[in-house]
Amino acid sequence: MIDFGIGQPQDTLLPLDLMRRAAAEFAYASESYSLQYGNEWGDGYLRLALAEFLSAHYGVAVDPEPLFITNGNSQAIDLACAAFTQPSDVVFVEEPTYFLAIDIFRRRGLTIVGIPVDDGGLSIDALEVELKGRRPAFVYTIPAFHNPTGVTLVAERRARLVELAQRYGFLIVADEVYQMLDYAGDVPPPLAAHVDSGHVLSLGTFSKILAPGLRLGWAQGARALTERLAQLPFVVSGGGLNPFASAFARTVIEKGWLVQNIRSLRSVYRDRVAVMDAALRKHFPQSIVFHTPRGGYFFWLRFPAGTDTRRFLEPAAKLGVGFRAGPKFSVCDGQREAMRLSFAFYDGTEIEAAIPLLARAIATT
């Protein structure tokens, strides 16, 4: 089974040798504090190294003090709900959006309102109209190489989004997990550049740029925002999050290995984008519309009106191919004519072999 629904790095891309070297550095240093309960904000040495790393990659100075270490972005989204919402509060999300975020918001008892996405990212005009009727606790957005559509929120809309947050008093929870997986070199500065506004909480993770199994990420925002995360009872009780993995990540950053790993991932994924793009153009009819991703993990395919891509799931599976159907990413059972394909988990040979099978399943259904 080649399942293009899997949105994670291929096992062969996980830097096992790099982590061995980091483990050796950790053992040699004999710093047992990483095996102890930690600070609520997270390991201080990691925060210092991370701030320097982010400053270089984001192009803006990052203060290490308000950085908060998380167990990755899914947990960080849930932490934001715990810190900034109550059941029945309203949250605005992009329509479509990351399906596990939808699940988190529903389990928190939140009212979810979808705001349309177009080729320029979140529609700020539609958001402004919605704001005249109700105020969200926060707006959840994936601004760079959006999951699932792959689009990027343009710079002008980013500025307008922050201005609206200040005017109407809501928080922006920016899931910036794909910000560094930029294959064309033209991604706008992250929403993290606006944390001084006091209305942006930017979430990042090592899952996409190093290894998901570390269960390690960060939240960046004004001190008053990240302090609310640090004061959550289970964070205080646990003595911060993941100090052991933090020691490894700190070493990887300080040695310059993370920069090298990101450079390698960009090269690999850029090649896979080209392979999948060529295969789709060769085997799929022109009536199926998509854009070539400029970063991230995903192709988002749109079929003619009236199509429900869920009906392709079973015939595709019989031919050994999987994908994510569009309604999975909708807050209102929409996006039926859409399909998400990830190129991250399979190499070029596997992609070239599976795309014709998927095309056959679609053509014969």
Image (cartoon, rainbow, N blue to C red):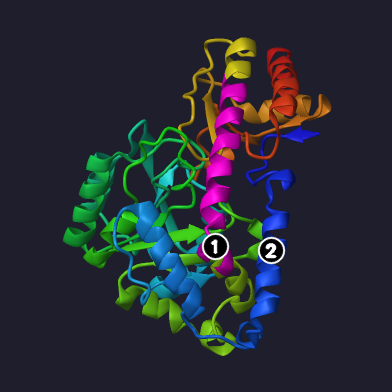
Query: Please, what secondary structure does the residue beneath circle 2 have?
Result: helix
Q: Quadrant of residue 23?
A: bottom right
Please determine whether, in this image, residue 103 is positioned above or below residue 160.
Answer: below
| Circle 2 crowding by C-alpha within 10 Å: few under 14, some 14–19, many from 20 | some
Q: Magenta region: which residues?
A: 251-277
- Look at the numbered discs 1 and 2 and tell me whether their residues touch, using CB distance below 8 Å: yes
Q: Residue furthest left?
A: 167
Q: Quadrant of the C terminus?
A: top right
- Under mark 2, the amino acid is Arg
Dot 1 surroundings within 10 Å: few (below 14), some, or many (20 or more)?
few
Front residue (pair 360, 354): 354
Say which residue appears at 40% left-offset and 59% top-offset: 54
Q: Amino acid at mark 1?
A: Lys
Tell me which residue sits at (33%, 70%) in the image. Answer: 63
Nearest the viewer among 304 and 263 is: 263
Of the numbered discs in the image, which one, if any, rests on residue 255?
1
196 in magenta: no
Read off the residue under disc 2: 21
- Whether residue 108 can be seen here: no
In front of the other: 103 or 144: 144
**Disc 1 to disc 2, how far (Cα)?**
10 Å
Q: Is residue 270 visible?
A: yes
- Residue 4, horizontal then vertical, whole percent: 68, 34
Residue 49 picture location, percent across and down: 46, 69
Main secondary structure type of the part rendered in magenta:
helix
Residue 44: percent from left, percent from top: 47, 79
Does the magenta portion include 262? yes
